[in-house]
């Protein structure tokens, strides 16, 4: 069944508070990343209950919506409906690093913004190097052949020119002209400069010595330099006459930045990178079995915080300087363990939806994409997450004890050829055993620990929580246990009718100026332009949920029809002001009982549309839903829907 990305994109847009509440949106391999202006307008319940969303996580001011393998498609759909993104917003209007956050969060945000867009390139290049390793291991090609040289060139290009690739993303993060940032990176990578720094003669600029450092494969120097360029750019803009800006601005920025990059910033970044590499190698050599096991076991929590991207430069530097024994090794153990725990859930669960999700997410985790498994399965069920941490730690301890080394940056089952290198075939054997231990230990521990199957029938209640976001978009939001029991206890009666809870003019649901309702994303129904300020029970039934902000009521009729009565559009933002509820959750009411009062005059003055959508949430339970009295002025209690 094809996924309706446009429908999901609309739901996500409303749940994050609309496009006007987002300053910037981008994505990595599995997550949509938003910077909302107002966190209070983000409805996490609504997000969590959109089918394509696997989970929600905050990292400082950044909202992360975990999607999985469909993230590129849903991102494109969001861009098409006008969500702010890197391709449409100017640097001034799309801040990528929130300056209100503390320094540590800002550093993480910056590194994440620089590195995550490179994941596809790094993955592709790593896989090509894996293929090349296999070709030479099985003697399909020799290292002296021209074919080997060409394939090696293809696989190595991304890593060799890493500063250039990073400069583009860093320019977005720090609001620097992309072409100017790339020029500095190209200076670092220039064959002439590389020849100078690898030669014997000293290198100097107007008598000022330049530290000899090869910036190919490097990460930190270019990030530091583009960050500094953001301040240089602001300074140059202040001092440049308006009439000469087009010529002087870029020229001055490069003339100031290039010498600073070569003489000061580049060497500092290089020393930092080498220092980190030295520290990691020392710790890995002295405490390998402890450190690798600890990092592998904690990696899911590092992923949750988003800090795993800060480890990527260290891992890349280790690979470039002889092989990694910590960062990529621990990631392999963790990702394999996450896949094993999720597949164990798929095997054991009786929840059909969870079984489908866990099966797909488990395979995805084994191939290096763990967020669907982490947020969609193990974190929700908790015990499988603990099992994955323990299993990964056991595998990591084994790898640390035997100093398992990876020569290609890879983080999944496909990393097996990455163990082939200077240490010979025993390293490959130890690496394979490490992966096997991580998988088997986790799988068994997950089965032993068990987990709570929340819904053994695999049927998720269709009733929406009335406390949904701007448009109550979470059509499958969980309700209280008692409310779920009431829903399942009520037998569906067909045919049936629904009467109006308010007096006013009946309108088609498609005329509501909100796509969530107009496109029937929540279900079919009608809308009422109210004549008075009271909401009554449309039929005999039960109050499933009164929104915390009182702007909506979820209602279950005694005939099994599940309704949401949504008073006005975007009125969730009023936070209960101008609303008075006369009922409580779980209360049984009779047709005509007063449920809620609202002050339409003040709500309209506050700028809100007062139209009241009345939606059948379990629309799929009916063959036909026919509006009644369209265009007519009616009193509450008049028929508005026939369901059969």
Image (cartoon, grey):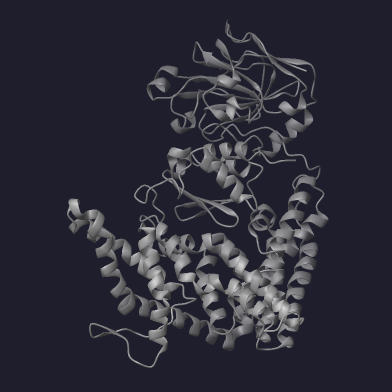
Camera-side residue of 498 and 181: 181
- Tell whether 80 sits left or right of 393: left
The relative height of residue 606 versus residue 256 in the rendered view (above or below) is: above
Q: Is residue 124 left or right of residue 79?
A: right
At horizontal 60% and vertical 72% (from top left) the residue drawn is: 155
- When asked about the image quadrant of residue 256, the answer is bottom left
| Horizontal side, residue 21 vs residue 116: left or right | left
Q: Position of residue 169 (x, y in %)?
A: 45, 60
**For the C terminus, which image quadrant?**
top right
Q: Is residue 334 above or below residue 536?
A: below
Q: Is residue 198 visible?
A: yes
Rendering coords of residue 497 (x, y %):
72, 14
The residue that appears at 79% across and 55% down in the rendered structure is 346
Q: Quadrant of the N terminus?
A: top right
47 or 313, which lies in front? 313
Name the side, left or right, on which 276 lies relative to 297: left
On screen, residue 377 above or below 389: above
Q: Is residue 105 visible?
A: no
Residue in the image at 40% along x and 65% along y: 182
């Amino acid at each position: 069944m094809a996924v309706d990305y446009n429908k999901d994109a609309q739901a996500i847009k409303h749940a994050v508070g609309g496009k006007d509440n987002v300053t910037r949106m981008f994505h990595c391999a599995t997550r949509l990343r938003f910077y909302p202006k107002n966190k209070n307008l983000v409805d996490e319940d609504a997000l969590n209950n959109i089918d394509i969303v696997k989970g929600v996580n905050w990292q400082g001011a950044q909202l992360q919506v975990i999607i999985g393998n469909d993230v590129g498609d849903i991102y494109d759909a969001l861009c098409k409906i006008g969500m702010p993104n890197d391709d449409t917003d100017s640097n001034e209007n799309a801040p990528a690093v929130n300056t209100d956050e503390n320094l540590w969060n800002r550093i993480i945000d910056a590194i994440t913004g620089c590195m995550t867009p490179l994941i596809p390139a790094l993955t592709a290049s790593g896989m090509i190097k894996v293929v090349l390793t296999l070709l030479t291991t099985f003697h399909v090609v020799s290292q002296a052949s021209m074919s080997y040289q060409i394939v090696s060139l293809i696989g190595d290009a991304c890593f060799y020119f890493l500063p250039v690739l990073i400069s583009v993303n860093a320019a977005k993060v720090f609001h620097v002209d992309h072409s100017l940032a790339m020029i500095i990176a190209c200076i670092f990578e220039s064959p002439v400069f590389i020849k100078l720094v690898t030669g014997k003669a000293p290198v100097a600029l107007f008598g000022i010595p330049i530290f000899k450092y090869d910036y190919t494969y490097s990460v930190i120097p270019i990030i530091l330099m583009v960050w500094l360029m953001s301040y240089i750019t602001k300074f140059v803009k202040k001092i440049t006459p308006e009439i000469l800006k087009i010529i002087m601005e870029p020229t001055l920025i490069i003339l100031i930045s290039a010498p600073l990059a070569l003489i000061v910033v580049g060497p500092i970044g290089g020393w930092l990178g080498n220092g980190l590499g030295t520290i990691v190698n020392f710790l890995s050599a002295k405490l390998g079995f402890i450190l690798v096991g600890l990092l592998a076991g904690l990696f899911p929590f590092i992923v949750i915080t988003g800090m795993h991207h800060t480890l990527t430069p260290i891992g890349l530097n280790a690979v470039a300087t002889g092989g990694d024994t910590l960062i990529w090794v621990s990631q392999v153990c963790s990702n394999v363990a996450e896949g094993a725990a999720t597949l164990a859930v798929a095997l054991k669960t009786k929840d059909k939806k969870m079984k489908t999700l866990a099966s797909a997410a488990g395979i995805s985790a084994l191939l290096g994409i763990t967020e669907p498994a982490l947020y969609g399965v193990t974190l929700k069920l908790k015990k499988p997450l603990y099992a994955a941490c323990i299993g990964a730690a056991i595998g990591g301890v084994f790898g640390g004890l035997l100093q398992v080394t990876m020569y290609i940056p890879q983080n999944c089952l496909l990393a097996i050829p990455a163990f082939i290198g200077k240490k010979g075939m025993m390293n490959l054997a130890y690496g394979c055993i490490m992966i096997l231990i991580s998988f088997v230990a986790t799988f068994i521990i997950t089965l032993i620990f068990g987990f709570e199957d929340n819904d053994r029938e695999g049927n998720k209640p269709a009733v929406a929580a009335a406390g949904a976001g701007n448009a109550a978009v979470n059509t499958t939001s969980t309700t209280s246990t008692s409310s779920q029991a009431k829903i399942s206890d009520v037998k569906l009666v067909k045919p049936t009718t629904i009467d109006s809870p308010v007096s006013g003019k009946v309108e088609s649901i498609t005329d509501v100026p909100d796509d969530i309702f107009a496109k029937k994303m929540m279900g079919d129904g009608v809308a009422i332009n109210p004549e008075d300020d009271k909401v009554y029970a449309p039929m005999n039934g039960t109050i499933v949920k009164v929104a915390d902000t009182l702007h909506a009521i979820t209602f279950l009729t005694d005939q099994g029809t599940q309704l949401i009565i949504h008073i006005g559009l975007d009125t969730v933002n009023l936070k209960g002001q101008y609303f008075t509820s006369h009922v409580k959750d779980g209360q049984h009411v009779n047709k005509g009982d007063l449920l809620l009062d609202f002050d339409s005059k003040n709500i309209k003055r506050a700028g809100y549309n007062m139209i009241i959508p009345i939606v059948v949430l379990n629309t799929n339970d009916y063959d036909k839903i026919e509006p009644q009295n369209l265009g007519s002025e009616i009193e509450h209690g008049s028929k508005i829907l026939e369901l059969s």
